[in-house]
Amino acid sequence: MPTNSNAEKLRKQIRKAFQMRALTLSKEAMEYAVQILVDLQSEERVRWINKVISVLSKQKASGPVLSFNEFKSAVNECASSRSSKQESLIRVIDLFTVPRLRYDEQRKMLVAVDGLSSAIGQSNDAKILYRERLKLVMQRALRNSAFEHYQLCTVEALLGTPERSDNSVLIGMLTQRDPGVYEIEDLTGAIEVDLKEATFHKGLFTDGCIMMLEGRSVGGLFRVSAVGLAPVESATVTRNYFGVTNWFGGEGTVACGSQIRLRTLCERNDRTRFILMSDVWLDDSRILSAINELIFAFTDSQLLAFIICGNFCSQMGTADSYHRTYDIFADRNVHFIFVPGPDDPSLNSILPRPPLPFQLFELMRDVPNCSFASNPCRIQYTNQEIVIMRHDLVEKMCRNSIHMPSTTADIPEHFCHTIASVGHLSPLPLHISPVIWQMDSYLTLYPLPDLVVIADKFEHFHYQLENTLFVNPGSFARTDLNFYVYYPALRTVEVCSADQNATGAPE
């Protein structure tokens, strides 16, 4: 029998998980949930809770509070489907169930944060958030071979020693103390920087960005001669150092990229493809017609999934449009994954965002291969890790950058280098790009995944960096119905237009 304290902790865990999806359990259902989950390990509990929530979201609930019979029926359905279900090539991972990652400086290893995350944090969580971002970048940079010839300095050491004739190298976070007055902060302190004579290398250097500065300290002022980003590290190098623990989420304790069996599955399905699109307005007849034609055009191909990002309405507040999609998506042998956009209905408007309420897609409860994902979300396909985020980030970073690339065409390359170097999906201060404090690690890109899709209204682009492919499919509705096709086995993408029903060879 569980102790009272253990049972109460489990009740809190269950209650939080269901509240994130706007669901509540009755007293009888809660006690039944505790009874069946108490003997399971922590990871197995999380998997069962999310399976039950997924089943319940497709059922017609009698009200906001789930009865014992409704909950038990969902549990029985999970149990029966588990025994008969074959191994799936694609898994949509609930972001709120993945391990929260941090770097332990004492043991020099990645560890999981203890306890459950909460949307209501404490004041100290904001400070911890920035420190953890910086620690991940610092440990990676110090292991890079480039630093064999450079001595990395700290702010504390600069302020505590006399002026030096040679240059020093700092890694820290840029902050703006006053308008036009910048400081660089690391784990030991902060020092004002003079950027007037600085040469800027590749990257978008914004307030809150972690960067590398070279210069001299003169009278408590760091005169910067060069600004750059910390070296980017491939997932292979990261796992060679930290091991093959699964930090991405989902089932299993070993990273899928390290499993030969899954790699073989990917190679066998060499024509499998994903369609990536954003701003799919379901209240626009032109868009609905194009989606219908696309599904028909790819019927005979090895299309595995449509990854469809919001916004799903051309105007906010037109929720009735979500009900018009059943005829398009029903009876299709393909997986549909919906990622909410910034203007779509949600419990909150900051990152990470929970999935869209299934009630908006009432008729789609009967569509079996339909997933409503969080934003960002994570997807595992055989041995590949895929991260999807719908966020208008490129222009926001450009507006806040202290230095811009010489031409607009270079922005995607600078943007991708910044995201990969900082290892975070939103390397901006919280007042510009709000994040739930205790859930900031869910936006971490470490180790780097195989595919990062940042669906942005900025012009579409793709860029390869350290075996990671960065893709922005652009806006489907605001362009000539442009979208991307991703070929996992080839690790390449192809830009297409629904006007042409393009399905040609990859670039």
Image (cartoon, rainbow, N blue to C red):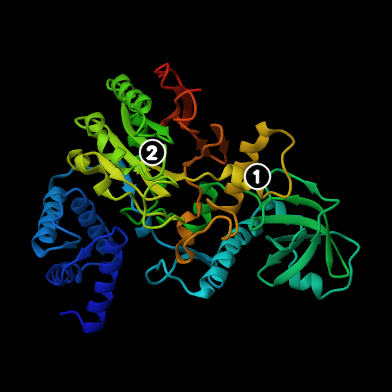
Image point 59% across, 67% down: which residue? Answer: 131
Label of residue 498 in the image:
none
Q: Is residue 271 left or right of residue 441?
A: left
**Numbered marks: total:** 2
> Splitting the image into 4 quarters, where does residue 498 fall?
top left
Label of residue 313 in the image:
2
Q: Position of residue 247 (x, y in %)?
A: 42, 56
Q: Of the two numbered discs 1 and 2 on the same chain, state the one appearing first in sequence.
A: 2
Q: Residue furthest right?
A: 165
Q: Residues within 10 Å of mark 2 (few under 14, many from 20)?
A: many
Q: Is residue 397 left or right of residue 184?
A: left
Q: Position of residue 234 (x, y in %)?
A: 55, 46
Q: Is residue 95 above or below residue 386?
A: below
Q: Residue furthest bottom?
A: 4
Cα distance between the residues tagged 1 and 2 = 26 Å
Q: Tag 2: residue type?
A: Cys
Image point 27% across, 45% down: which residue? Answer: 360
Q: Which residue is mark 1?
A: 398
Q: 278 or 268, which is in the foreground?
A: 278
